[in-house]
Image: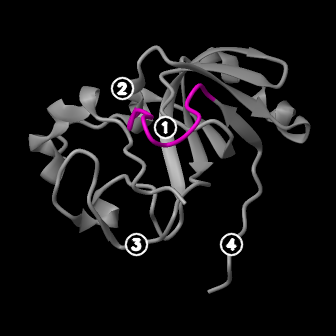
């Protein structure tokens, strides 16, 4: 199979200057503001995005230190397969965050609930649509007994270069 290459469409700006100390999911980053700078050649693609309250950001974990197929997640002390956790040390270091869209000014998206490190390359934006994205009767495996830890957990720097 051939190699797939992506080019960033923008850059994410946040108050999180390094992975260590950054909230590990958007619900743990409630109220934290950031911006997404869209590169000029992609601004036309923002048309009508302002009608959505939330957006899905797909981005590149540019500070990941290594690829691994097993890792210990932040919310537990036991190793799991990389596809059963949301750690950045993935074969394809792609991150996903659902954030609140507060407004758009030209090429700048104002967002809240940001759990992303400053300077992160943005790969894509999709509107969050509850009828498409929300599911009922879900199971979330090993994390079910640890979800209450989320508000207190922060990145401890274990996955950075």
Q: Give the SS element for disc 2.
A: helix
Q: Do the residues labelled 3 and 4 touch (CB within 8 Å)?
A: no
Residue 150: mark: none
- The residue beneath circle 4 is 4
- The residue beneath circle 1 is 97
Q: Main secondary structure of the magenta part?
A: loop
Q: Which of 121 and 118 is in front in this view?
A: 118
Q: Give the SS element for disc 1.
A: strand
Looking at marks 4 and 1 on the same chain, the residue that comes earlier in the sequence is marked by 4
For the C terminus, which image quadrant?
bottom right
Residue stretch rendered in magenta on the structure = 14-25
- Does the image show residue 48? no
- The residue beneath circle 3 is 68
Q: How far apart are marks 1 and 2 (CA)?
A: 10 Å
- The residue beneath circle 2 is 27
Q: Distance between the residues labelled 3 and 4?
A: 19 Å
Q: Distance between the residues labelled 2 and 3?
A: 26 Å
Residue 126, position as x, y percentages in the image: 60, 37
The nearer-to-camera label among 3 and 4 is 3
Residue at x 41% of width, y 37% of height: 133
Rendered view: 98 above or below 77: above
């Amino acid at each position: 199979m051939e190699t797939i290459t992506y080019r960033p469409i923008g850059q994410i700006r946040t108050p999180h200057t390094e992975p260590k100390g950054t909230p590990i999911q958007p619900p743990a980053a409630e109220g934290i503001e950031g911006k997404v700078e869209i590169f000029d050649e992609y601004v036309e693609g923002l048309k009508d995005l302002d009608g959505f309250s939330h957006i899905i950001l797909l981005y590149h974990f540019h500070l990941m230190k290594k690829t691994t197929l097993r890792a210990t997640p932040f919310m537990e002390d036991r190793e799991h397969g990389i596809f059963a956790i949301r750690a950045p040390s993935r074969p394809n270091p792609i991150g996903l965050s659902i954030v609140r869209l507060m407004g758009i000014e030209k090429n700048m998206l104002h967002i809240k609930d940001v759990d992303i490190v400053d300077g992160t390359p943005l790969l894509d934006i999709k509107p969050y649509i509850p009828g498409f994205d929300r599911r009922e009767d879900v199971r979330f495996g090993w994390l079910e007994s640890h979800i209450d830890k989320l508000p207190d957990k922060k990145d401890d720097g274990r996955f950075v270069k």
